[in-house]
Image: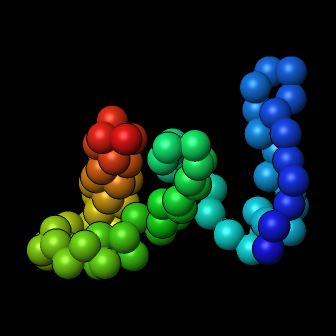
Amino acid sequence: MEKIVSFDKQGRLYIPDEMRKFLQFKTLILKLSGERLIIEPIDDDPIEALGKLGKEKLKGKSIATLRKEAREDIEKNAVKKIRRH
């Protein structure tokens, strides 16, 4: 899928509706790689993201605590990725 898009007066980039629906993510990492702009999704479900990371953080904790820790972990990792690029 490919679309031509442009920035508005406030510098925002509009992602067409059909692409947003296809991605189904609310949080994204935006990276510059040379002259390319790369957009990568971050899992919206922090519990699923933890499972993918294979961490042992699930034992003996409430869902609320797990969600909070997972979101913090995801955001911390996203910031690290952004700073590296």
For the N terminus, which image quadrant? bottom right
Give whichever of 16, 70 is nearer the camera: 16
Whether residue 21 sits left or right of residue 61 in the image: it is: right
Look at the picture and state if 29 lies above or below 12.
below
Look at the picture and state if 21 lies above or below 3.
below
Give whichever of 82, 57 is nearer the camera: 82
Residue 49: percent from the left, percent from the top?
37, 70
Whether residue 11 sits left or right of residue 47 in the image: it is: right
Q: Can residue 49 be seen in this view?
A: yes
Q: Outermost residue, front direction? A: 34
Whether residue 15 sits left or right of residue 65 in the image: it is: right
Residue 17: percent from the left, percent from the top?
87, 61
At horizontal 35% and vertical 54% (from top left) the residue drawn is 74
- Residue 46, by quadrant, is bottom left
Q: Is residue 27 visible?
A: no
- Residue 55, by quadrant, is bottom left
Residue 19: percent from the left, percent from the top?
79, 66
At horizontal 62% and vertical 63% (from top left) the residue drawn is 25
Look at the picture and state if 2 lies above or below 35.
below
At horizontal 30% and vertical 41% (from top left) the residue drawn is 84
Residue 20: percent from the left, percent from the top?
76, 63
At horizontal 29% and vertical 63% (from top left) the residue drawn is 66
Give whichever of 36, 53 is nearer the camera: 36
Look at the picture and state if 80 lies above or below 50.
above
Count all numbered tags in the image, as a single digit.
0
**What kind of colouring is applied to the model shown?**
rainbow
For the C terminus, which image quadrant? top left
